[in-house]
């Protein structure tokens, strides 16, 4: 994790600093001593920062900015700490005050009106939200942080930033994961992920495993990457569905093995089949018997016996 702290005494220097995160056109108030400070924590996945601005600023994100830097792979969650500000997407205008947060994507033109103020800003990959929120957020969504999960998320954001450089990269990522889960639940308008969507994701994982066991990499990182999710998302959704990735993969591997053993044209040995399905031979035999009541060898022998009897 990288941590930095910068004080900008000039308008141009702060504009360059802000454009490093989301490029925009800036208009500054006529205060004689306009200044701002910015502290930031950044990892490969998340960014958490706080700015303290003494003077007014207006920002315009135009179509030209979007063409040059789409910024369509993350959302920003902005939490006023002092003062309030306005944000406009097309004809929709929101005013965000302390105790609330706005969650917005910047892949379409927008305008921000930021008075003399201080605020926290949390950058989150879109993939962390988009599988919980349908449709995707194209405009700003205002969240209440005054009570319940909102207050817990607000406290975690402030505490995480207060620790600054004292958190390791792993600790910072773990805390940001938890904050993101809470924000997802708030944005979805529920205190638990939607059951139908949860079941849909679990079934997608099951179908992918069923199609690729014995043919490709079905370890968690590869499966999550192929489906466009994070490893954490896969673990969380399956846990909330009452299973784990390991158990799901084991179940689908055993089902695939049973289908092969049930095919009289299959010529693989038991050892070859175990390897193809990701087991050691001894573990495969024990797991198969536990699941289906017979060892793989006994299952194959009984099936072939039944086929011979029918033919006779």
Image (tube, helix red, strand yellow):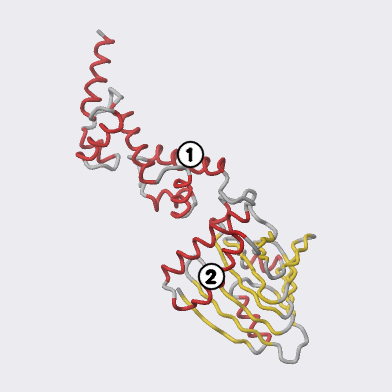
Of residue 310 and residue 82, the one placed in the foreground of this image is: 82
Q: Quadrant of the C terminus?
A: top left
Residue 73 rendering spot, x and y as whole percentages? 57, 61
Residue 57 rendering spot, x and y as whole percentages? 73, 79
Label count reads 2
Q: Which mark is residue 97?
A: none
Callout 2 secondary element: strand
Determine whether 300 is above or below 215 in the image: above
Determine whether 276 is above or below 132 in the image: above
Of residue 177 and residue 131, the one placed in the foreground of this image is: 177
Q: Which residue is mark 1?
A: 203
Q: Is residue 227 left or right of residue 132?
A: left
Residue 81 rendering spot, x and y as whole percentages? 66, 74
Label 2 crowd bin: few (<14), some (14–19), many (20+), radius 10 Å: many
- Kindly give the residue lying farthest to the front in the view shown: 147
Q: Is residue 53 left or right of residue 223?
A: right
Q: Quadrant of the N terminus?
A: bottom left
- Kindly give the residue lying farthest to the top in the view shown: 312
First-in-chain label (1 vs 2): 2
Q: Is residue 35 left or right of residue 238?
A: right
The residue at 45%/64% (across/down) is: 174
Find the distance from the CA under tag 1 to the CA under tag 2.
Answer: 32 Å
Label 1 crowd bin: few (<14), some (14–19), many (20+), radius 10 Å: few
Q: Which mark is residue 47?
A: 2
Of residue 153 and residue 270, the one placed in the foreground of this image is: 153
Determine whether 125 is above or below 16 in the image: above
Callout 1 secondary element: helix
Residue 90 rendering spot, x and y as whole percentages? 77, 61
Determine whether 59 is above or below 207 in the image: below
The residue at 67%/61% (across/down) is: 144
The image quadrant of residue 269 is: top left
């Amino acid at each position: 994790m990288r941590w930095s702290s910068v004080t900008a005494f000039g308008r141009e220097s702060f504009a360059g600093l802000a454009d490093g995160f989301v490029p925009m056109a800036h208009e500054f108030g006529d205060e004689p001593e306009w200044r701002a400070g910015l502290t930031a924590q950044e990892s490969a996945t998340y960014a958490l920062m706080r700015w303290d601005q003494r003077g007014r600023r207006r920002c315009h994100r135009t179509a030209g900015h979007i063409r040059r830097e789409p910024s369509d792979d993350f959302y920003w969650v902005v939490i006023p700490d002092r003062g309030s500000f306005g944000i406009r997407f097309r004809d929709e205008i929101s005013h965000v005050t302390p105790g609330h947060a706005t969650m917005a994507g910047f892949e379409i033109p927008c305008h921000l009106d930021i008075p003399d103020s201080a605020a926290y800003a949390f950058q989150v990959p879109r993939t962390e939200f988009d599988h919980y929120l349908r449709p995707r957020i194209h405009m700003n969504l205002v969240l209440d942080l005054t009570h319940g999960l909102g207050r817990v998320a607000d406290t975690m954001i402030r505490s995480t930033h207060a620790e600054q450089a004292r958190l390791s990269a792993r600790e910072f990522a773990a805390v940001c994961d938890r904050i993101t889960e809470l924000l997802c639940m708030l944005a979805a308008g529920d205190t638990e992920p939607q059951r139908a969507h949860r079941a849909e994701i679990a079934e997608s994982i099951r179908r992918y495993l069923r199609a690729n066991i014995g043919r490709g990499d079905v370890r968690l990182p590869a499966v999550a990457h192929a489906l466009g999710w994070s490893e954490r998302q896969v673990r969380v959704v399956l846990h909330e569905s009452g299973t784990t990735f390991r158990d799901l993969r084991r179940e689908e591997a055993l089902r695939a093995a049973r289908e092969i053993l049930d095919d009289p044209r299959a010529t693989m040995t038991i050892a070859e089949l175990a390897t193809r399905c990701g087991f050691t031979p001894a573990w495969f035999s024990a797991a198969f018997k536990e699941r289906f009541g017979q060892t793989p060898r006994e299952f194959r022998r009984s099936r072939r016996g039944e086929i011979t009897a029918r033919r006779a």
